[in-house]
Structures are given as structure tokens and as C-alpha cells.
């Protein structure tokens, strides 16, 4: 993990947080693909994710900007805008599955890590998800992130491990053109199904 090449306190004061909107899509796609691998995000996917962020005109997805550049984002599906799939285990969730939003993705520019961006984005998404009517949020955490930072971060913020899922992103790598940054050939990364209650 590369530390910020700038004064952290000064940087934190100059980070601006905004609700996800179309004018930020290009920056979100670029950052997402740089961090997670080519075709992790596309125009079509992000448009779909944006639509799923809303309930009653409340948007649960956020971006972080520094010097007019997207340096972080959290994509969150409202509790009524997604359905559990084979990588979900609702029978093990301690809350009503109908009241669970989905934390699709959290990404921070590696040069900006250590500035509190990830936690700030999470807190903003949680506040919006609660206003939408959610009582918890589910995430599939990438266990191959450098230093397993994603798992540590989500655990630190209250996330509880529900179940580990081998080959979580293999379908995307085989059928959707996703190019995992750590696997040669098709993705074999393990995902951790985690739930955070509000």
C-alpha cells in the first residue's frame, strides 16, 4: 500500500464528498478498472448500478473528489433494488433479508489510502440506506486485496463474516471480460460474504 505523498490532514480537509451522479461516471469507471482489473466497471454496468442506488429519490452511492478527480467511490444498491443470488446465504443473516441493502463496491485510489476516505464513504452510504429503510448491508469482500485490507477494513467498521465463497468472480472473468489483477487466466479469488447491521 503506497502512503499518500502529501500531508494527510491537509488532504482530508480538501476531499469533497458528493452523491454519485452521471458527471462522475467516467472517473468512477477509470478508478474501478485501475484498482480491480479491466472491465470491472463499464458504462452499462455503472448505469445499472446507479439506478439500483435509489429509493424514493434517495441515492445511497457516493464519490470522493480531490482536486476535481474521483479518488474514491462506494456503490450501494438500495434494499428493494437487488435480489440475493447463489453467493448469498439469507438463512444466516440476523435481520430480515428484505431490509438488507447491498454494498456493491468500495474503491479508494491507492495514493489516497490512509485519508479516511473508505470509512467516510461507508458512513455516508449507511446514512442514506437507513433513510431508504434498510437495517443492514451485505458485501462480498475481495479476500485477495493487498494485505487483505478490504476484509480488515469492513471488519473494523462492524462487518460480520457470514460465509466464504470460492471463485466468487469466476463467472465475470469467463463471460463478462473481467480481468482479475491477481489471477492469471480466469479469476479464482475467494469472496467473503459479510453483513453489517446499522
Image (tube, helix red, strand yellow):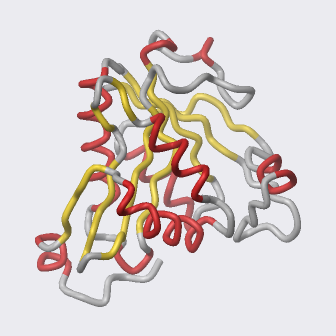
Q: Quadrant of residue 125?
A: top left
Q: Position of residue 170 (x, y in %)?
A: 81, 50
Q: Position of residue 7 (x, y in %)?
A: 18, 85
User: Foreground: 66 or 144?
Assistant: 66
Q: Quadrant of residue 15?
A: bottom left
Q: Is residue 41 above or below residue 134?
A: below
Residue at image location 61% in from the left, 59% down from the top: 42
Q: Is residue 44 above or below residue 100?
A: below
Give the quarter of the figure containing the C terminus: top left
Q: Position of residue 168 (x, y in %)?
A: 74, 44
Residue at image location 36% in from the left, 45% down from the top: 61
User: Foreground: 62 or 119?
Assistant: 62
Q: How many marks?
A: 0
Q: Is residue 135 above or below residue 63?
A: above
Determine whether, in the image, residue 100 is placed left or right of residue 173. left
Q: Is residue 111 above or below residue 65?
A: below
Q: Quadrant of residue 36?
A: bottom right
Q: Position of residue 56 (x, y in %)?
A: 30, 23
Residue at image location 60% in from the left, 16% down from the top: 90
Amino acid at each position: 500500500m503506497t502512503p499518500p505523498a502529501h500531508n494527510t490532514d491537509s488532504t482530508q480537509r480538501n476531499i469533497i464528498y458528493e452523491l454519485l451522479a452521471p458527471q462522475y461516471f467516467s472517473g468512477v469507471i477509470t478508478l474501478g478498472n485501475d484498482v480491480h482489473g479491466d472491465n470491472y466497471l463499464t458504462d452499462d454496468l455503472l448505469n445499472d448500478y446507479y439506478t439500483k442506488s435509489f429509493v424514493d429519490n434517495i441515492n445511497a452511492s457516493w464519490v470522493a473528489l480531490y482536486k476535481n478527480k474521483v479518488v474514491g467511490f462506494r456503490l450501494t444498491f438500495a434494499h428493494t433494488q437487488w435480489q440475493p443470488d447463489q453467493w448469498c446465504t439469507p438463512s444466516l443473516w440476523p435481520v430480515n433479508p428484505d431490509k438488507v441493502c447491498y454494498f456493491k463496491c468500495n474503491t479508494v485510489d491507492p495514493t489516497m489510502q490512509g485519508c479516511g476516505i473508505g470509512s467516510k464513504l461507508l458512513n455516508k452510504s449507511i446514512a442514506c440506506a437507513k433513510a431508504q429503510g434498510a437495517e443492514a448491508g451485505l458485501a462480498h469482500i475481495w479476500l485477495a486485496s493487498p494485505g487483505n485490507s478490504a476484509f480488515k477494513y469492513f471488519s473494523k467498521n462492524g462487518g460480520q463474516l457470514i460465509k466464504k465463497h470460492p471463485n466468487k468472480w469466476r463467472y465475470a472473468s469467463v463471460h463478462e471480460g473481467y480481468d482479475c489483477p491477481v489471477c492469471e487466466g480466469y479469476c479464482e479469488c475467494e469472496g467473503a460474504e459479510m453483513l453489517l447491521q446499522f
